[in-house]
Image (tube, rainbow, N blue to C red):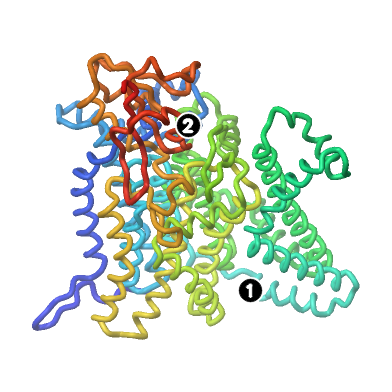
Amino acid sequence: MKENNNLITSKYKFVIAPKYILFFFLIGSLVAGYFLASDYGMSWDIRYQIMMGKYNQEYISLANFLNPPPFELMGHDKYYGPIHEILIQSVSNFFRRYQLEFAELQLYYWINFSSFLLGMFFFYNLARRYMQAWASLLSTFLLFSQPILFGHAFINSKDIPFMAFLMGSIVIGLHMIDRIEPSLGSSVIINNKISKFAILEWKKNNSKRKKIAIIFAWVWSVTVFLTIIFWSFISKLPELVVEQSMRAGSERISGQLFLRFAQNIDIFSLDAYVHKATILFSRFMTRSFLLCFFLLGIIIISLLPKTINQIWNNFLKAYIAEIFSKTFIRETASYLINPWSFLAGIFLGITTSIRIVGPVAAGLVGMVILCRKKEKTLAPLTAYLLIGSAVTYLIWPLLWSTGFSGVIQAIRVMTDFPWKGTVLFNGQFYSGADLPFSYLPALIAIQLTEPVVIGFIIGIPFLIWLKTKKTISAPNFWLLTFWFLFPLIGVMLLHPTIYDNFRQFFFILPPIFIVVGISVDWLFVKINLKWINSMIALAILLPGLLAITTLHPYEYVYYNHFVGGVGGAFRQFEMDYWAISINEATIFINENAITDAKIVVGGPYQNVEYYAREDLKIFDLDKIKDDSLDDYDYAILLTRGNADLEYAIGYPTIFQVEQKGAVFVVVRDLIR
């Protein structure tokens, strides 16, 4: 949709266009963000991120590029793309060069927040493809005012920048398609109507395999649906089986089988076996459903031989022929110097050098151009990918010394990150690689504000209805669908290592707000009364704005009222997992601790060490071999992992950081 007038005027009044409102809002937020950045404590691993940025920034030189020395940064985190940290260090060096005063942490957080604001600009441009300007502006404000995102916008130098640049890559990629599409001819696939051909072939097939496939599909669908609905009951089956088997002992077959597998029953508790059984049961169910789905797909494909032949002859062969055509290289070269291809490739490279899954943007852009069914698409896509790959290599110093093997290793590490902690979910602790398949959708449902969750649920059937009415184009529909569903289903089925709630998957959130915005846009048009629409917009934004105001600077621990708010989620879900509350605890210790006090820290002791008085001695609780705390004067204990319930229980709590009934950290006096 095209924006109406940039400035709507009359003799008595003028209305500023939404895009200008957004511009002034982003500028104001940029200024305000600089001052707000100083309110946030040091996050758990930020010192390592700063060090990583400095190392990469110092590594960059022409000599190292031409003859790269070994990349000596240790740890698995070196496989994270460094470009955002390099940017931060470059800005810091600029401030130092011109002797400008700045606080390193404040500047770091401010640049993080700036990338979030850039993401809002890209989101608005994306939303304009789906809805009118005012609804796009409201959707942008709704995304901006999500407490979990607003809090992470300052302290998160990975997931927020990745979300912002992924949106940028997609938006600019779509602009690239808009510019080059007129030069591409219509595809022969349009004339062949492959989907209709497949439906017709399916209807004509009366074999027994078709009946088996239909029964199989119904049984599979109903089973999956019932499993999801009643999972809270089904998931308790392993616990019941283990308990009954333990009670049965060697007198019954169930007990004998249990004792055969549980040979260390005298060492491990019942809870340990229940936890292990629950994990194995969840894996078994997930993999069984996945295997059945693939089997169903194979059966259906085998029933459509003519359709497969049509796809091969009229689709795959056409693209293979294009690759080996004489003009392919010439056309690719022309797109390499196309301004929009070049810009889209640059953003793709930056996105990939923030996180290795950045090529998701290229996949979505490629899907859109293929959905538009144009011929000669491989040349522009090839140029786009070549530019993106070159930019990724240029701004990721690790790859200079490792080459393609570094990319493979980064993919391996990031898809199965060796994180050994536990994750609190629904009152239970899980390994990051063994989370329930409901983990990601459940957290999305309870950490976004209520209007977003409700609007998304209502908006999904509305979006499908718009697709059937062709009000929304097929490429735009499938862009949202694949962007959101593929990562969501992949997480639910493949169980990658996840921790710190769902921050690694913030990038799948924009489609949710697009769907909500489409529904609101339709509602605004139907009502068509400015004062009612304004009240609706305020009601939609209010929960997020109130939470940001009342939780500051701990906005990122937000949970909505579906689980009783932050207080209701305490001890049930993760809270201050980046331990920014440690800063407040350290300030209290600095002001109240005795001289030369010994402080034991259950959490990021290095952050306490950074801010603590010079006379204070800081010790890591995890490295203390003796459980006795008699030799120490104070304990700073995060409630994450329930450290405060396991250590120094009998000692008085002299300070704690809390918000709305949730306690993040406690300080206990070990002297008294």
- Mark 2 crowd level (few <14, some 14–19, many ≥20, 10 Å Cα): few
Could you tell me which secondary element the residue under label 1 belongs to?
A: helix
Q: Where on the picture, by quarter, is residue 312?
A: bottom right
Placement of 151 over or under 176, stated as above or below: above
**One can see residue 61 in this view:** no
Who is closer to the viewer here, 105 or 58? 105
Q: Is residue 311 left or right of residue 327?
A: right
Task: Identify residue for label 2.
Answer: 646
Q: Is residue 320 left or right of residue 15?
A: right
CB within 8 Å, label 2 to label 1? no
Placement of 288 over or under 543, stated as above or below: above
Q: Tell me the kind of residue under disc 1.
A: Ile
Query: Which mark, residue 190?
Result: 1
Query: Which mark, residue 171?
Result: none
Placement of 312 over or under 394, stated as above or below: below
Who is closer to the viewer here, 392 or 324? 392
Of the residues tagged 2 and 1, which is closer to the observer? Answer: 2
**One can see residue 525 in this view:** yes
**Alpha carbon separation for disc pair 2 and 1:** 66 Å
Q: Quadrant of the C terminus?
A: top left
Q: Earlier in the sequence, mark 2 or mark 1?
A: 1
Residue 275 placed where, x, y %?
65, 42
Residue 276 placed where, x, y %?
68, 40
Q: Is residue 424 left or right of residue 169?
A: right
Could you tell me which secondary element the residue under label 2 belongs to?
A: loop
Who is closer to the viewer here, 218 or 29? 218
Q: Quadrant of the N terminus?
A: bottom left
Placement of 530 over or under 169, stated as above or below: below
> How many numbered badges does the structure rendering display?
2
Residue 374 placed where, x, y %?
57, 66
- Residue at 39%, 50% in the rendered image: 164
Q: Tell me the kind of residue under disc 2.
A: Glu
